[in-house]
């Protein structure tokens, strides 16, 4: 307060001296230019101006306005009240702002969309693989499918096998049938029931050995056993593996074929851990293959591997895709894109799953109402309860975003320059902010800015450099000033 009063007293004394000199005629003999200079000094004192400086060369400090002797820019006033501004602030004239080509934009709230680009390959749908094994020990007399890649339909014959165990079971069945006929005229119900139970047990044994109902009916009709039994395909698909050759003796459980139903395939994508939090179940995925350039295939994320591959630092993400046209072949490389929208609450998957019921074990099973899974019979749960979509009534507020050209990022810090309001001249203040995801051409702002504030999009480095020329701390290196001061002691 004392310093302020002394300053005011100095102004009045200074003004008195000037007026006295003018009155006594001391200045009347000087040139008009000198009079103009003095009037400028007087005006500066009245307007509470400390000195005049150049916004681009702040080392220039003059007592009167004019042009910068270095760059010829108009000098700007520095007032006593400017001391109330932050040490990270800079004031310049409108003309200086134009010359420095400083541009600003408003901080706004809006939904922004990012594109996560992934690579992967086509794989078999593990739920549609069938393993053809020997249900009994015996000898492979014939392989109807003798090479891989053959397409088979459900019910097609695959293998003809000779097995003493099968022969014995057929004989038991024929004997049981005969016994049932023989005891029909018996008056003892116990014998009838025992004979019928024996027949039932033999029938069950034949089925457990892999004999179909049609084969059992043929044995009953013809009354003779078959030396070779035929194994049929339980599904339609492609034979992708053949494990035995004709004449090979096999044991119970020996794998003969592997058949894959390719009407549906899996796309396994590699996701880096830095992008993992941008993906969720149910998100739509678009991808292309080298074989069909320009053709877009679509699917949905059905599974995210809970384990990270330490060698590649990636996680496998599975996409279920319909392949009824048969274009996608296991092993094909694909390039995929997942479009991700963000809100203040996190990732917005979209509302296409809102109100739907999903199987926790098989997320590809989606139904309009609560029921049971077609695959495992598990009771379906609401998509909202599983976290696939936001619950009804929850507000999805648009995030606060700034263009990527706004922040100056150094290490872990992000700095922006904000144009202050309510100032006579353009004034910019440095501010540290906390950024979220980069989404396309925008950064999501988590902390440090408010909606509607103006931030510098072009000229950030010029402002930061000007601060350093004024011996103010740079926002890029806020401790530099302290270090410099310490080095002088």
Image: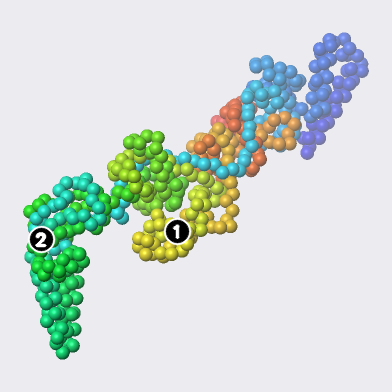
Quadrant for the C terminus, please. Answer: top right
For mark 2, give the secondary structure.
Answer: strand
Q: Is any atom of residue 396 visible in this view?
A: yes
Q: Is residue 239 above or below residue 464?
A: below
Q: Is residue 120 left or right of residue 370?
A: left
Instruction: Please tell me which residue is depicted at 43% across the width and 64% down the height of the picture.
Output: 371
- Camera-side residue of 17 and 181: 181
Q: Is residue 103 left or right of residue 124?
A: right
Quadrant of residue 373 in the image?
bottom left
Q: Is any atom of residue 88 visible in this view?
A: no
Quadrant of residue 381 in the image?
bottom left
Would you say the residues marked 2 and 1 are in contact, meaning their CB atoms lie under 8 Å apart? no
- Camera-side residue of 114 and 158: 158
Q: Position of residue 91 (x, y in %)?
A: 68, 30
Pair 2/1: label in front: 2
Quadrant for the N terminus, please. Answer: top right
For mark 1, give the secondary structure.
Answer: strand
- Which mark, residue 228? 2
Q: Is residue 435 above or below residue 127?
A: above
CA gap between label 2 and label 1 equals: 46 Å
Instruction: Please tell me which residue is depicted at 37% across the width and 48% down the height of the picture.
Output: 321
Q: Is residue 178 above or below residue 221?
A: below
Kindly identify which residue carries mark 1: 367
Q: Residues within 10 Å of mark 2 (few under 14, many from 20)?
A: some
Residue at the bottom extreme, as displayed: 187
Q: How many marks?
A: 2
Instruction: Please tell me which residue is depicted at 78% across the width and 35% down the height of the picture.
Output: 4
* For marks 2 and 1 on the same chain, the one whose residue lies earlier in the sequence: 2
- Camera-side residue of 192 and 323: 192
């Amino acid at each position: 307060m004392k310093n302020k009063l002394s300053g005011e007293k100095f102004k009045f004394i200074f003004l008195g001296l000037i007026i006295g000199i003018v009155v006594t005629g001391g200045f009347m003999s000087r040139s008009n230019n000198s009079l103009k200079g003095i009037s400028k000094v007087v005006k500066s004192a009245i307007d509470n101006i400390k000195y005049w400086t150049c916004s681009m060369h702040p080392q220039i400090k003059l007592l009167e306005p004019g042009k910068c002797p270095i760059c010829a820019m108009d000098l700007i006033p520095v007032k006593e009240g400017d001391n109330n501004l932050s040490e990270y602030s800079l004031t310049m004239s409108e003309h200086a702002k134009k010359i420095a080509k400083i541009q600003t934009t408003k901080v706004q709230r809006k939904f922004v969309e990012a594109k996560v680009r992934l690579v992967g390959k086509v794989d078999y749908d593990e739920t549609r693989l069938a393993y053809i094994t020997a249900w009994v020990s015996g000898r492979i007399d014939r392989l109807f499918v003798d090479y891989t890649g053959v397409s088979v339909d459900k019910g097609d014959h695959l293998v003809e096998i000779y097995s003493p165990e099968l022969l014995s079971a057929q004989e038991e069945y024929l004997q049981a049938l005969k016994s049932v006929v023989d005891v029909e005229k018996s008056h003892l119900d116990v014998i009838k029931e025992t004979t019928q139970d024996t027949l039932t047990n033999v029938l069950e044994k034949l089925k457990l050995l892999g004999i179909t109902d049609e084969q059992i009916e043929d044995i009953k009709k013809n009354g003779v056993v078959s030396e070779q039994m035929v194994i049929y395909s339980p599904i339609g698909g492609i034979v992708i593996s053949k494990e035995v050759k004709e004449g090979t003796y096999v044991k119970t459980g020996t794998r003969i074929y592997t058949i894959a139903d390719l009407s549906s395939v899996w796309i396994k994508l590699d996701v880096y851990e830095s992008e993992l939090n941008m993906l969720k179940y149910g998100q739509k995925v678009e991808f292309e293959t080298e074989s069909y350039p320009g053709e877009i295939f679509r699917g949905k994320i059905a599974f995210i591997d809970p384990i990270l591959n330490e060698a590649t630092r990636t996680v496998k993400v599975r996409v279920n895709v319909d392949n009824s046209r048969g274009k996608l072949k296991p092993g094909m490389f694909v390039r995929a894109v997942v479009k991700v929208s963000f809100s203040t609450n996190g990732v917005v998957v979209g509302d296409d799953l809102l109100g739907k019921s999903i199987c926790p074990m098989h997320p590809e099973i989606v139904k309009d109402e609560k029921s049971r899974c077609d695959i495992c019979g598990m009771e379906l749960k609401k998509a909202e309860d599983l976290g696939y979509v936001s619950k009804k009534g929850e507000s999805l507020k648009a995030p606060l975003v700034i263009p990527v050209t706004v922040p100056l990022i150094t290490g872990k810090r992000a700095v922006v320059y904000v144009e202050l309001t309510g100032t006579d001249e353009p004034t910019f203040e440095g501010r540290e902010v906390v950024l979220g995801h980069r989404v396309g051409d925008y950064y999501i702002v988590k902390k440090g800015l408010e909606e509607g504030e103006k931030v510098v999009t072009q000229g950030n480095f010029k402002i930061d450099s000007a601060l350093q020329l004024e011996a103010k701390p740079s926002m890029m290196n806020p401790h530099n000033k302290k270090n410099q001061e310490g080095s002088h002691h």
